[in-house]
């Protein structure tokens, strides 16, 4: 009896430490996020691509699945509002048209690389919503906790105590069931849009690149294809998708197109390989 009580207490303490540590890191998401310095053009184009995706999905589902069509229509309406009021100088439709034509005709490969980076984060968000996973896949700090979460999830599963905690099993599981199909459709459609930008903007610009840059383009093409397969077949874990985007695709975009990362807090930064220079052991031992 005494041995069982000790095991229960140990399990509760382990879970509690993990929940507190994860909560602390979650509050610092903006610090550890793998975010690039964006500009008005990339932000505008990113909203434009997302708006078109939602409008196309709304039309695709109408009238066969009116519920999905309404979900995508609501998303499109919100994005149209956001993109229309992105610039205070836009006061009527003709102003918006001028802004739209300007960004479409003047943007370069670096701008479109930023758009791809932004859309990749949206893919992770939409996929997480689709399978209802309780972890922010766009937050790079969660990568540093992968090993800890695996160990602690195993200990929690063996515990006889039903202490309240998040279920991280889904984070490492393959073939998770789709709960919110509208989000899943959006994630898949965004990947198609990313492939289109890669083929028609980024890949074509590689004609003026060095051999090293061409290697980056080929790596990007392979990794984007892998990401599409994982999402479309729904046969990869959220952790696998997260690692692929943050540790392979984002760094390739950064290397190939000179993207700059935002300044982080003192002593906390991301390098070209997408690896974090932070002392996680200190955090976990607090």
Image (spheres, rainbow, N blue to C red):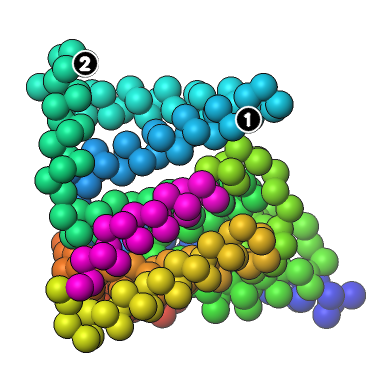
The answer to whether residue 203 is left or right of residue 58 is: left
Q: CA distance from mark 1 to mark 2?
A: 28 Å
Q: Which residues are magenta?
A: 187-207
Q: Please report the residue visible at 29 percent of the width from the left and 52 percent of the height from the top.
A: 115
For residue 195: magenta? yes
Q: Quadrant of the C terminus?
A: bottom left
For residue 98: magenta? no
Determine the image quadrant of residue 90.
Answer: top left
Between discs 1 and 2, the one toward the N terminus: 1
Q: Nearer the viewer, residue 68 or 217?
A: 217
Q: Please report the residue visible at 68 percent of the width from the left and 53 percent of the height from the top.
A: 164
Q: Callout 2: helix, strand or loop?
A: helix
Q: Nearer the viewer, residue 265 or 246?
A: 246
- Residue 62 coordinates in the image, percent (x, y): 63, 24
Q: Is residue 87 above or below residue 191?
A: above
Determine which residue is flagged by label 2.
93
Determine the image quadrant of residue 76.
Answer: top left
Q: Please report the residue visible at 42 percent of the width from the left and 22 percent of the height from the top.
A: 77
Q: Is residue 194 visible?
A: yes
Callout 1–callout 2 Cβ contact below 8 Å: no
Q: Is residue 74 above or below residue 115?
A: above
- Residue 50 coordinates in the image, percent (x, y): 40, 39
The answer to whether residue 137 is left or right of residue 257 is: right
């Amino acid at each position: 009896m005494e041995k069982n009580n000790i095991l229960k207490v140990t399990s509760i303490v382990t879970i509690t430490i993990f929940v507190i540590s994860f909560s602390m890191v979650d509050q610092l998401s903006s610090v550890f996020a793998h975010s690039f310095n964006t500009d008005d053009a990339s932000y505008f184009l990113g909203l434009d691509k997302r708006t078109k995706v939602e409008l196309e999905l709304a039309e695709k589902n109408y009238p066969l699945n009116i519920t999905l069509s309404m979900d995508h229509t609501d998303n499109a309406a919100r994005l149209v509002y956001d993109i229309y009021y992105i610039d205070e100088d836009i006061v009527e439709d003709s102003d918006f048209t001028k802004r739209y034509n300007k960004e479409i005709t003047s943007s370069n490969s670096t701008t479109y690389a930023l758009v791809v980076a932004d859309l990749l984060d949206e893919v992770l968000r939409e996929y997480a919503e689709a399978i209802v996973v309780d972890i922010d896949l766009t937050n790079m700090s969660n990568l540093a906790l992968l090993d800890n979460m695996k160990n602690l999830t195993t200990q929690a599963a063996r515990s006889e105590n039903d202490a309240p905690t998040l279920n991280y099993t889904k984070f490492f599981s393959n073939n998770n069931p789709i709960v919110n199909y509208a989000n899943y459709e959006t994630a898949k459609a965004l990947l198609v849009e990313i492939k289109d930008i890669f083929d028609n903007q980024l890949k074509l610009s590689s004609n003026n690149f060095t051999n090293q840059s061409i290697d980056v383009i080929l790596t990007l093409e392979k990794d984007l294809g892998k990401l599409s397969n994982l999402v479309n077949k729904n046969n990869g874990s959220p952790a696998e998708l997260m690692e692929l985007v943050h540790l392979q695709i984002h760094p390739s975009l950064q290397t190939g197109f000179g993207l700059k990362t935002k300044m982080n807090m003192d002593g906390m930064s991301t390098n070209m390989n997408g690896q974090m220079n932070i002392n996680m052991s200190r955090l976990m031992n607090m």
